[in-house]
Amino acid sequence: MKAYYERRAAEYDDWWRGTGRFVERHRPGWDEEVAALRRSLEALPPARTLDVACGTGFLTRHLRGEITGVDQSASMLELAQARVPAGRFIQADALELPFADQSFDRLFTSFLYGHLEEADRLAFLREARRVAGELVVVDSALNDEVEPVEWQERVLNDGSRWQVYKRFFASEQLAEELGGGRTLFAGRWFVAVQS
Ligand SMILES: C[S@@+](CC[C@H](N)C(=O)[O-])C[C@H]1O[C@@H](n2cnc3c(N)ncnc32)[C@H](O)[C@@H]1O
């Protein structure tokens, strides 16, 4: 996953914006849902927040409070830092966070959890609980066009092909996996749970 996302950094926001390779994707209501998801994040009370696997900072910029972002990809972090100048961005592994216990009020993560296979998922949740009291997870919603678990073939602009593990969630199922929580957002494309 590391090499894939490093290579994808410069074209990553095409997925959010429906540009580049994503122009031809049929995603009814996508832009409206991105805006609604953004509003639900902006409505969270300001907090000392760690955004794990922040990517280009596309959602990070809508989190309020004192923001730290981590990602394993240097190119992603560079884009995130430019987008959120007041934030602190650090290259680190989500499964081994370089922070003391309970250093943050909230750990936020978007579109990482669903890429983790079981052992990594459990390691991530242990780390998340160790460094923060609250957990907010945003991920892809289960809808009639996808399977709950897929191995997807992804193609980048340079023609390279990558196999990516990907899960899709109903918000109740995600909340249960996180050990309980409330749905912040549930749409056709995205779910967000606060635990
Ligand atoms: C699908 S992108 C999501 C980016 C961003 N959170 C968003 O919502 O746009 C997944 C991100 O997770 C990062 N990532 C994957 N595995 C990681 C790990 N073990 N530790 C840190 N970052 C990781 C990738 O580099 C990539 O930036």
Image (tube, rainbow, N blue to C red):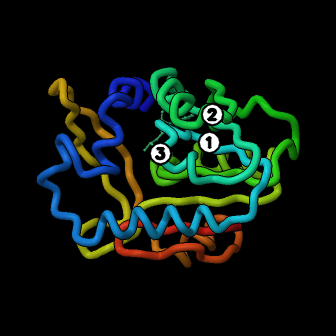
Report the residue at 29% width, 38% height from top.
163
Instruction: Using the numbered discs, state the Cα–Cα distance from disc 1 to disc 2 in whole angstroms.
Output: 5 Å
Which numbered dot is residue 70?
2
Is 18 drawn above or below residue 98 in the view shown? Answer: below
Q: Which quarter of the figure has residue 53?
A: top right
Label 1 C-beta lies within 8 Å of the nearest ligand 1 atom: yes
Left or right of 155 in this view: 109: right
Label placed on residue 154: none
Q: x and y percent of residue 157 in the render?
A: 19, 30
The residue tagged with tag 1: helix, strand or loop? Answer: strand
At x 62%, y 42%, the residue is 52
The residue that mark 3 highlights is 58
The answer to whether mark 3 is within 8 Å of ligand 1 is: yes
**How many C-alpha atoms fall within 10 Å of the one at disc 2: few (<14), some, or many (≥20)?**
many
Whether residue 23 is situated above or below residue 135 in the rendered picture: above
Judged from this view, the residue extending furthest toward the left is 24
Q: Residue 117, can we see it?
A: no
CA gap between label 3 and label 2 equals 13 Å
In the drawing, what numbered circle is on residue 52? Answer: 1
Front residue of 189/30: it is 30
User: Which amino acid type is marked by label 2?
Assistant: Val
